[in-house]
Amino acid sequence: MVLGQTWRKSLRNGILVIVVLVVSALLCEMAAQFYVYNIAMQGKLFRPDDELGWSLLPNNDLVRLNHDGAPWHISTDERGVRGPSSWPVDGSRRMLILGDSFAFGEGVDLHNRFDTLLARQIQDLAIVNIGVMGYGTDQEFIQASNWADQLNKGDILLILTYCNDFFDIVKTHHSGRSKPWFESKAGNLVLHKPDIGVMEIVRDRSYILSLLASKLNVDRQKDLDARLQRAGELYEQILEEQTRKFRDRGVDVVLVYHGRDVFNLPFYANQIFASSCELVTTCMSLDLATSQFERSEIFLSDGHWNEGGHRVAAEQIVQHLQQHYANLDELHRNDDPKVTTKRGD
């Protein structure tokens, strides 16, 4: 009898402890969500993706604070793209931009992003920018497959590479999220899809778990250091194989790279980019141009471009295209007699 009463009392106490813990966790999560969205202004941007690891939320509209404390607006369409996700049906030459947070324009409004400025300076150039924060070159090309068939001879694929891509392409996880990755076997690329598990799904519903996953961001890939030794070669192989479907269609491939001196790599980035330039139509570095300015004129405190950085990037890309194509008139599609395009003065 006494034993039964003791057991029931222990059970009640155990249930009470569980209830208190659950309620406390819920209250903490509610408080965290309120802080993140309304005070820190770091609203949710991503969702798990079986092909890409994560993708931008579609039809999202929010304001965040950048690392300098200034607000910036983020709006995505039904395809989860910040900006136009399709090209107009006219005679404009099409440009598709691939990249990470620099291409996405983290920390600045869309009207100050480099591709918006680029489009203002080159008439009859229609741009779709599918850059996503955190993406490596591997994810960028996987994502680009959804747009590849819409580019034809004379259109442009612009790849914006930051040197952290060498780290990203050898990782199987990024900030607690599983990602796709390429492995080179017998000279061929083998794609490994992301392993979307419970953690990836739950973390997007809980800020506390998301924060925990980011703080415990230890890549589970045992051979990460060994793979980093070969990251330069892997980057070239990805670039060569993944641009082939564009080059075969007559699409011009433009490689724009930066950040060569930012990271400690086990190889010379300059050599990798020099050989990579032979795989594309034309290439350029932004490092020399950005180094001519005070850091605060170009970068936010977290290292992303501020409005000045995007302006310099746009100016440099325009100048490079002018030099490569001799004059910007060559950027206009004029080989189809049925197409009439406006000409700049």
Image (cartoon, rainbow, N blue to C red):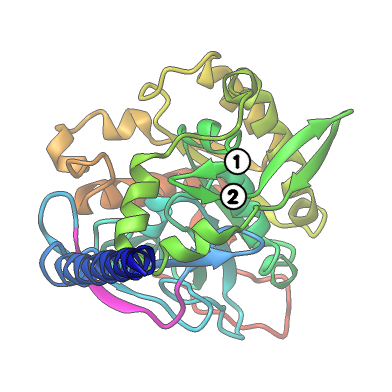
Q: Position of residue 38 (x, y in %)?
A: 14, 72
Q: How many marks?
A: 2
Residue placed most toward the observer, 188 or 148: 188
Region of the chain picked out in magenta, as a range: 57-65
188 relative position to 313: left or right: right
Identify the residue at the far front of this view: 1
Where disc 2 sits, the SS reads: loop
Query: Callout 2, which amino acid?
Result: Lys
Quadrant that contains the N terminus: bottom left
- Horizontal and vertical percent position of residue 286: 39, 36
Residue located farthest toward the right when viewing the structure as drawn: 186
- The mark nearer the N terminus, 2 or 1, is 1
Cβ–Cβ below 8 Å for labels 2 and 1?
A: yes
Q: Residue at x 66, y 61 (%)?
A: 51
Q: Amino acid at mark 1?
A: Thr
Q: Position of residue 288 (x, y in %)?
A: 34, 28
Query: Is label 1 in a helix, a strand or a loop?
Result: loop
Magenta highlight on residue 62: yes
Residue on which disc 2 sits: 179
How far separated are the C-alphas under marks 2 and 1? 5 Å
Is residue 226 positioned above or below 334 on the image? above
Residue topped by disc 1: 172
**Membership of 44 in magenta stretch:** no
Which residue is depicted at the point 16% across and 69% down?
31
> On the rendered structure, is 81 left or right of 311?
right
Q: Which mark is residue 343?
A: none
Up the image or down, 58 lies above or below 1; here it is below
Residue drawn at (53%, 65%) of the image: 48
Q: Nearer the viewer, residue 17 or 121?
A: 17
Local crowd at mark 1 within 10 Å, few (<14), some, or many (≥20)?
many
Q: Residues within 10 Å of mark 2 (few under 14, many from 20)?
A: many
Residue 129 shows in this picture: no
